[in-house]
């Protein structure tokens, strides 16, 4: 999710009806890369193990190659890391977000921001 | 909501924690302009009158001026139209969406699209 002043931009890539990549999945990939495990990443993001695993599974089913690979280690205990393919998808998704954020900046957004109130009238 | 191949882009403008403009509100403005009434617009979009009215009310409270003005006509019966200010906000929001959509097109998106499967693996 890109935030530029009062503007939030959300990009989602679809595989059929399934979200193959979006703000939540991209954050999860970054957290898996940092934590080295799916369960630790889920904990860091405040998600259940089940939900975390479902997001990883959806990504791995939506793309030509696996984005996350796990190593065995017992129930919930194995390590996980991004594949080079997963790193590349994540980097390109972030590039798209940046391109949209940059494109949104400028006179039109400034004018809209100037017409917005700081808080809603009650 | 802008759709470019497998990519969906969603832009939201915030006033405090309230969404002042987004895909649903922009569609509602266009429908009110076409239908000439809030209740008819809600019906056309399959929304309850209450939800439709709450969206209009949120917009009118988030911006410097009213976006939608209503004329009296009894319970739910009055007409509604966009103010010139509302037309301008809507047009500028659509411009921002188009700028983002255009920025997202290109090699990076083509490469991502080429790595996506047409349907998730089961």
Image: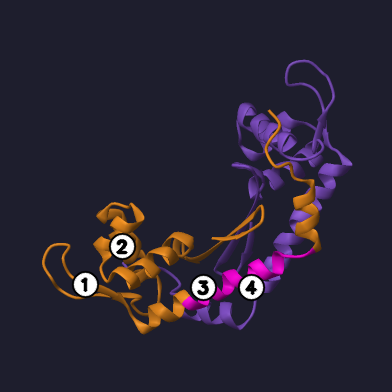
Chain colours: A purple, B orange
Secondary structure of residue under mark 4:
helix
**Residue B79's spot in the image, x, y percent?**
21, 72
From the viewer's perspective, tell me whether residue A54 is left or right of residue B30: right
Q: Is residue A53 magenta?
A: no
Mark 3 or mark 2, which is nearer to you? 2
Q: Quadrant of residue B77?
A: bottom left
Residue under mark 4: which chain is it in? B
Mark 1 nearby-residue class (10 Å; few <14, some 14–19, many ≥20): some
Q: Against B64, is B117 above or below?
A: above
Residue plotted at (70% across, 46% down): A27
User: What is the distance, in whole Å, between disc 4 and disc 2 at their CAs?
Assistant: 27 Å
User: What is the distance, in whole Å, between disc 1 and disc 3 at their CAs?
Assistant: 24 Å
Mark 3 nearby-residue class (10 Å; few <14, some 14–19, many ≥20): many
Earlier in the chain: of badge 2 and badge 1, it is: 2
Q: Quadrant of residue B69?
A: bottom left
Does the magenta stretch mainly form a helix, a strand or a loop?
Answer: helix
Q: Residue furthest top?
A: A74
Q: Against B93, is B53 above or below?
A: above
Earlier in the chain: of badge 3 and badge 4, it is: 3
Secondary structure of residue under mark 1:
loop
From the viewer's perspective, tell me whether residue A52 is left or right of residue B29: right
Residue annotated with mark 4: B99
The numbered disc on residue B93 is 3
Mark 4 nearby-residue class (10 Å; few <14, some 14–19, many ≥20): some
Earlier in the chain: of badge 1 and badge 3, it is: 1
Residue annotated with mark 2: B41
Residue plotted at (78% across, 37% down): A35
Highlighted range, magenta: B91-106
User: What is the distance, in whole Å, between disc 2 and disc 1 at their CAs?
Assistant: 11 Å
Mark 1 or mark 3, which is nearer to you? 1
**Residue A116's spot in the image, x, y percent?**
46, 75
Earlier in the chain: of badge 3 and badge 2, it is: 2
């Amino acid at each position: 999710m890109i935030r530029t002043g009062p503007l939030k931009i959300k990009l989602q890539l679809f595989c059929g009806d399934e979200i193959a990549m979006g703000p939540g999945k991209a954050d999860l990939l970054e957290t898996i890369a940092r934590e080295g495990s799916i369960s630790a990443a889920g904990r860091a993001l405040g998600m259940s193990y089940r939900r975390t695993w479902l997001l990883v599974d959806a990504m791995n089913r939506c793309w030509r190659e696996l984005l996350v690979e796990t190593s065995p280690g017992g129930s919930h205990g194995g390590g996980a890391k991004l594949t080079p393919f997963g790193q590349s998808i994540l980097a390109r998704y972030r590039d798209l977000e940046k391109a949209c954020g940059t494109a949104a900046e400028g006179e039109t957004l400034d004018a809209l921001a100037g017409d917005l109130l700081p808080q809603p009238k009650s």
